[in-house]
Image: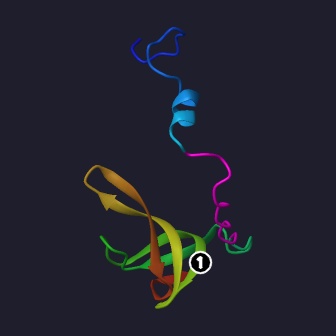
């Protein structure tokens, strides 16, 4: 198999390429992870009103919230009709488009 894991290859290993890259360990520390969603908000059912690509009221699953300069947004998963059956969509939508079920 071309590119396999056989010794004796004429190409340098990943470790050798990393060592030759000039990038050394100990760079800037990684950014702090974003805060975790509150447990009581995770997995809450909701209604999604007129989402992009569909119209009407669709059932959805609220995954998390975030605040933006324009207001609150919810990350939701919902299904819309597609040409070959339902399509699962995950999107950030304004809080005004979401309603508690």
Q: Is residue 83 left or right of residue 24?
A: left
Q: Which residue: 64% across, 55% down?
A: 27
Q: Residue 79 colored magenta?
A: no
Instruction: List x then y, in percent, for residue 14.
Output: 54, 29
Q: Which residue: 33% across, 74% down?
A: 52
Q: Is residue 9 above or below residue 72?
A: above
Quadrant hosting residue 86: bottom left
Instruction: List x then y, in percent, for residue 74.
Output: 53, 77
Q: Residue 35 colored magenta?
A: yes
Q: Is residue 26 left or right of residue 54?
A: right
Q: In the rendered image, which residue does mark 1 sit on?
A: 65
Outermost residue on the bottom side: it is 70
Instruction: List x then y, in percent, for residue 68.
Output: 51, 85
Q: Which residues are magenta?
A: 23-36
Q: Is residue 68 above or below residue 27?
A: below
Q: Is residue 6 above or below residue 26?
A: above
Report whether residue 101 is seen: no
The local crowd at label 1, few if under 14, some if 14 to 19, many if 20 or more residues have their Cα within 10 Å, is many
Q: Quadrant of the C terminus?
A: bottom right
34 or 46: nearer the viewer: 34
SS state under label 1: strand
Instruction: List x then y, in percent, for residue 80.
Output: 36, 63
Please identify the dominant SS of the magenta region: loop
Q: Quadrant of the N terminus?
A: top left
Q: Which residue: 59% across, 77% down?
A: 65
Outermost residue on the top side: it is 8
34 or 60: nearer the viewer: 34
Q: Which residue: 45% across, 69% down?
A: 91
């Amino acid at each position: 198999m071309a590119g396999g894991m056989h010794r004796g290859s004429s190409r340098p290993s990943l470790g050798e390429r990393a060592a030759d890259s000039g990038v050394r360990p100990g760079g800037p520390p990684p950014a702090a992870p974003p805060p975790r969603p509150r447990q009581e908000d995770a997995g809450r059912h909701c209604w999604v009103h007129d989402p992009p690509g569909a119209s009407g009221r669709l059932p959805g699953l609220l995954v998390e919230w975030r605040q933006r300069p324009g207001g609150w947004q919810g990350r939701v998963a919902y299904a819309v009709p597609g040409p070959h059956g339902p399509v699962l969509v995950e999107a950030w939508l304004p809080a005004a488009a979401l309603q508690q079920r």
